[in-house]
Image (cartoon, rainbow, N blue to C red):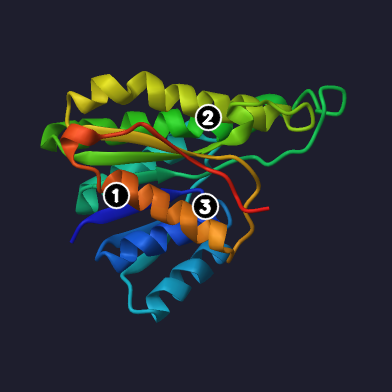
Amino acid sequence: MKTFLSIGTGPGMGLETAERFARAGFRVILSARDAGRTQELARQLAAKGHTAEARTVDAGDPGSVARLVEDVERAFGLDVLHYNAAAMRQATLADQPRDSFNGDLAVNIGGALAAVQAAAPGMAGRRSGTILLTGGGFGLQPHPDYLSLSIGKAGIRALALGLFESFRDQGIHVATVTVAGFVTPGSADAAAVGERFWALHGQPAGAWEVEAVHTPAG
C-alpha cells in the first residue's frame, strides 16, 4: 500500500486532498498541531473505509517536521508528501507583531523546506515520489493585509519552481497548486483543489508540470 502524508491537515483542502488519495487506495497519515482535531479528521476517513491515522506535528518547528517525515519513511516508505500548513494571519505591516513574523514564516515556508529535506533522500533512493505544496494567490499578488502569508506563499512557489528540474532528474515530482482565493471547508472548491493535486501526481514522467492554478468560484 502506498503512503500519503499530509502536514498541516485542516478540514478543507488538506482533508479533501487526503481523501482523494485515500479513495485511490493510499494509506493516509494526517498531521497537525491540534491532536484532537486531527484525530477526528482521521476518524472521518476511517468511517468511510479508508486507511487513515493521525499524528501530531508542529509545522513551525523544523525538527518536529523532520522527525515526522523520517518516522513515516521508516515505517512505511513515503510515496506522496503534501505540505498544507499556513499561518493565516491578517495583519498589515503596522499591525504585525514584531515577535510573530518569524514564527509565521517558520510555518508558511520553513516547515515546507524541512519536510522536503527529510523526504527527498528516501524518494531519490527509490527514484520515485511526489512532493505537493499548497500555494496561494498572494504569492503572485501580495496583499498588504496578509503580508506574512503573502511572503510565505511566494516562498512556497519559489521552492517548487526552484527544485522542480533537479528533483525531476532524481525521479521526484515537485508541484504546487496556487489557490487564488480563500476556500471554505466542505466546499466544491476544496474538493476541486484535491483533484488538482491528484491530477498533478498522476501525470506521466515525461509530462510533469510544476504548477496548477485554482481560482475559487465567486
Using residue 65 as the reference point, say whether residue 131 is left or right of it.
left
Q: In front: mark 3 or mark 2?
A: 2
Q: Residue at x 42, y 30 (%)?
A: 114
Using residue 88 as the reference point, say whether residue 2 is left or right of it.
left
> Residue 97 location in percent, x, y?
81, 28
Confirm whether residue 103 shows in the render: no
Query: Disc 3 and disc 2: Cα gap in Å?
Result: 15 Å
Which residue bears the numbered disc 3?
Answer: 32
Query: Disc 3 and disc 1: Cα gap in Å?
Result: 14 Å
Q: Are marks 3 and 1 in contact (CB under 8 Å)?
A: no
Using residue 20 as the reference point, say whether residue 167 is left or right of it.
left
* Amino acid, disc 2: Ile
> Residue 105 location in percent, x, y?
61, 28
* Amino acid, disc 1: Val
Earlier sequence position, callout 3 versus callout 2: 3
Earlier sequence position, callout 3 versus callout 1: 3
Q: Residue at x 60, y 50 (%)?
A: 216
* Label 2 crowd bin: few (<14), some (14–19), many (20+), radius 10 Å: many
* Amino acid, disc 3: Ala
Residue 2 position by quadrant: bottom left
Q: Residue at x 25, y 48 (%)?
A: 202
In the image, is residue 31 above or below residue 45? above
Which residue bears the numbered disc 2?
Answer: 109
Earlier sequence position, callout 2 versus callout 1: 1
Using residue 147 as the reference point, say whether residue 171 is left or right of it.
left
* Label 3 crowd bin: few (<14), some (14–19), many (20+), radius 10 Å: many
Q: Secondary structure at mark 3?
A: strand
Label of residue 123 in the image: none
Label of residue 72 in the image: 1
